[in-house]
Amino acid sequence: MLNRRIFSQSAAAVASLMLLSVPVAALAADEAPDAMIKRLSNEVLETIRNDTSIKAGEVDKIMVLVDRLLMPHVNFRRMTAAAVGPGWRKATPEQQKRLQDEFKVLLVRTYSGALSQVTNQTVEVKPLRAAAGDKDVLVKTEVRGKGDPVQVDYRLEKDGSDWKIYNLNVLGVWIVDTYRTQFGQEVNAKGIDGLIDSLVARNKANAAGNGK
């Protein structure tokens, strides 16, 4: 049970880092969504294996990687808006930017420690069930390594000629849905500024707890 939990955390870490850190040059026009996920998964796994500081979960290095490579393959604004819920529409542009920034830090810090578990994992992409004209698809994958395979699925939307990820499922749990419950409670109790303050506090606490 413990090994499966650790493996699941490492799979989630890889998937979350994938949401935040694939280079612009890696994107190919009109690339099929399942082919894109396969390629990006392999690139992220290889990057983690070859960079000891990322593998060690050094958050500052991971954040530099994230910021340097940008996020053109992810609709992170949509992810954050969905996680925040109805309160997002009432937030000012500045508040929305702060929410996105703090949410990104939260994701990185939540999963950074599990990157040390990445060793010989491979990713198997399941056959895509989608029609040629579909603009919203589900790509199912399994991360294989020690222990049972870990299910990791991606929701993607078509944006011009590119596909962008906007939600992630690990072992049957959608990451946006999980945070929507937490964030909704914060917004209802303390408003948007209260949620921002809560995220800042959580990120500081995570930083202190990790010693980074």
Image (tube, grey):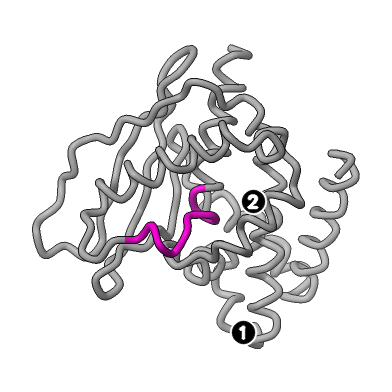
Q: Residues within 10 Å of mark 2 (few under 14, many from 20)?
A: some
- The reply to whether dot 1 and dot 2 touch (C-beta < 8 Å) is no
Which residue is under mark 2? Answer: 107
Q: Is residue 179 above or below residue 14?
A: below
- What's the CA distance linking mark 1 and mark 2? 23 Å
Magenta residue check for 99: no
Tell me the residue at 63%/33% (across/down): 115
In the rendered image, the vertical position of residue 144 relative to residue 101, given as above or below: above
Quarter of the figure with residue 137:
bottom left
Q: Residue at x 39, y 47 (%)?
A: 40
- The residue drawn where x is 31% and y is 30% is 124
| Residue at the spot of label 1 | 90
Q: Position of residue 186 (x, y in %)?
A: 73, 63
79 left or right, relative to 200 = left
Find out whether residue 26 is within the magenta segment.
yes
Q: At 74% from the left edge and 75% from the top edge, which residue is drawn?
A: 191
Q: Quadrant of residue 2?
A: top right
- Residue range in magenta is 18-27
- State whether residue 151 is above or below residue 41: above
Disc 1, SS:
helix
Q: Nearer the viewer, residue 87 or 29?
A: 29
Is disc 2 placed on a helix, strand or loop? helix
